[in-house]
């Protein structure tokens, strides 16, 4: 696999408490650099930290005194110490909504929360991961930001690059929702539609990285993936802090590549190890759309390998047929006593409407997937309604309006009281 290097990987770089890159498969360690695959076994590299020397109570105070965005967790992230001075969209610290109406509707008595990441600068959770990748790109000397995207990432990269003064060139499947396309294009970067699905786009980007045409480019979810992925840990930190430094019993997470889910688990484990929360069991549940359910299919069949699928679902942001982190998701769901489940497109739409009607939150299709899966897992007795449960909404319904296209005017009337009465609305 091509390994691109701008800054030498042996240069000492300041990446906070990040100590090295470590292979998830064989544990081989290499210095921090813009590399993503193990030179020994081609396994994925991830960040290993040195948290020794942290005093729990001092760390907690430092976090609580920090800014109302992901950088309050800078001591736990691979970022330069002076990040606050650099232009960044500063995402995060989104609302954890106590969803009592939805809880009543679903029969949850143990406390139900929606972590609403539609509140981020480009209205999806992707701003968290891009914020990390951007800082890594600065450190490694890249000047162009790029990515392969199912939609939301393209917008997050375009916006972050605009703010930071980087060039951006992002790649998406050519047939995405209009909301996603406009949201990615408006920031002025280059947006390229590829004739194919996300897996084709991703394969193309891997080739581009190895070619002179892509030299000097920071692909946030390819050669910067180890840094990018760490951004998802902030969801775990925020949920625990917003619950009063407590772990939820159950958490329902959408799966595209599976990266987010694996890093939420990593974040929760770190909080336990650092003594910031009490060590008690938690279960992680993965959510997919039936039309792109390679991980839930493997989970239900008891398999360790994830067989690729050709996606066909309205949940386009989750439509990755060959998810890189699929096997790790299976491990985590099994280790924590969770599960992976999927719902049909019809159930996704019903769930979008249910969340909107009960809590005033308009989710994109990915949020329909998590809420729909939560409902299904409660009905099948897999999810315990007496336990504290957090459901992620990772994106904004305004970007996937077509999913609820049947929704509209109650009535059209003339501007007269008679007409209003005739419509039976009085
Ligand atoms: C990208 C994305 C996810 C999950 O992505 P992973 O690849 O699994 O980390 C979830 N929800 C939305 C809306 C997304 O755009």
Image (spheres, rainbow, N blue to C red):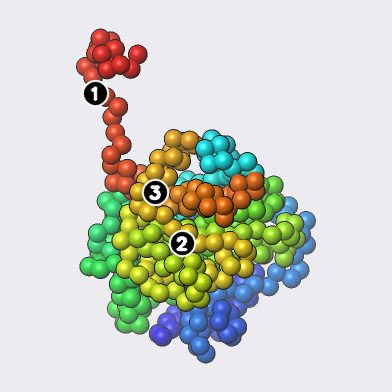
The image shows residue 194 at horizontal and vertical percentages of 25, 67
Q: Does the closest atom of ligand 1 sit within 8 Å of the Cβ of label 2?
A: yes
Q: Nearer the viewer, residue 360 or 57?
A: 360
SS assignment at label 1: loop
Residue shown at 31%/82% (left/top)?
Answer: 212
Label 3 sits on residue: 347
The image shows residue 54 at horizontal and vertical percentages of 75, 65
Label 1 sits on residue: 412
Residue shown at 45%/49% (left/top)?
Answer: 372
Q: Is residue 8 visible?
A: no
In the visual, does 291 lie left or right of 113? left
Q: Is residue 346 above or below residue 303?
A: above
First of labels 1, 2 by sequence position: 2
Label 2 sits on residue: 255
Quadrant in which residue 184 is drawn: bottom left
Contact, CB < 8 Å: mark 3 with mark 2? no
SS assignment at label 3: helix
Q: Is residue 173 above or below residue 92?
A: below
Give the mark toward the camera: 3 or 2.
Answer: 3
Q: Kindly report the distance in space between the C-alpha atoms of the residues bearing marks 1 and 2.
A: 41 Å
SS assignment at label 2: loop
């Amino acid at each position: 696999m091509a390994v691109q290097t701008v800054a030498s990987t042996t240069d000492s770089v300041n990446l906070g408490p990040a100590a090295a890159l470590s292979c998830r498969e064989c544990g081989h360690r290499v210095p921090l650099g813009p590399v993503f695959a193990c030179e020994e076994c081609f396994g994925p590299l991830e960040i290993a930290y040195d948290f020794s020397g942290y005093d729990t109570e001092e760390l907690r105070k430092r976090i609580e005194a920090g800014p109302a965005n992901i950088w309050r967790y800078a001591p736990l992230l691979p970022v330069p110490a002076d990040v606050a001075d650099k232009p960044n969209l500063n995402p995060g610290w989104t609302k954890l909504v106590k969803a009592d109406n939805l809880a009543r509707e679903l029969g949850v008595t143990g406390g139900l929360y929606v972590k609403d990441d539609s509140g981020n600068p480009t209205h999806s959770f992707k701003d968290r991961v891009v914020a990390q990748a951007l800082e890594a790109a600065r450190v490694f000397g890249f000047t162009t930001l790029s990515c392969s995207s199912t939609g939301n990432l393209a917008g997050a990269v375009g916006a972050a690059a605009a703010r930071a003064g980087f060039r951006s060139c992002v790649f998406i499947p050519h047939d995405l929702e209009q909301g996603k396309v406009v949201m990615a294009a408006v920031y002025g970067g280059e947006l390229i539609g590829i004739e194919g699905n996300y897996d084709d786009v991703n394969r193309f980007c891997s080739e581009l990285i190895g070619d002179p045409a892509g030299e000097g480019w920071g692909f946030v979810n390819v050669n910067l993936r180890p840094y990018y992925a760490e951004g998802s840990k902030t969801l775990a930190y925020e949920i625990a802090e917003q619950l009063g430094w407590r772990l939820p019993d159950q958490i329902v997470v959408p799966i595209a590549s599976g990266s987010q889910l694996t890093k939420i688990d990593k974040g929760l484990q770190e909080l336990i190890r650092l003594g910031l929360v009490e060590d008690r069991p938690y279960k992680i549940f993965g959510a997919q759309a039936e039309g792109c359910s390679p991980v839930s299919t493997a989970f239900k069949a008891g398999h360790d390998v994830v067989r690729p699928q050709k996606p066909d679902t309205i949940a386009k942001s989750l439509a990755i047929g060959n998810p890189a982190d699929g096997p790790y998701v299976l491990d985590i769901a099994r280790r924590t006593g969770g599960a992976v489940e999927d719902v049909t497109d019809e159930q996704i739409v019903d769930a979008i409407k249910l969340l909107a009607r009960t809590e005033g939150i308009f989710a994109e299709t990915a949020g329909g997937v998590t809420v729909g899966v939560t409902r299904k897992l409660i009905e099948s007795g897999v999810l315990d309604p007496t336990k504290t449960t957090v459901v992620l909404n990772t994106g904004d319904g305004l970007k996937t309006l077509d999913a609820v296209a049947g929704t509209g005017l109650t009535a059209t009337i003339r501007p007269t009281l008679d007409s209003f009465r005739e419509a039976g609305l009085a």
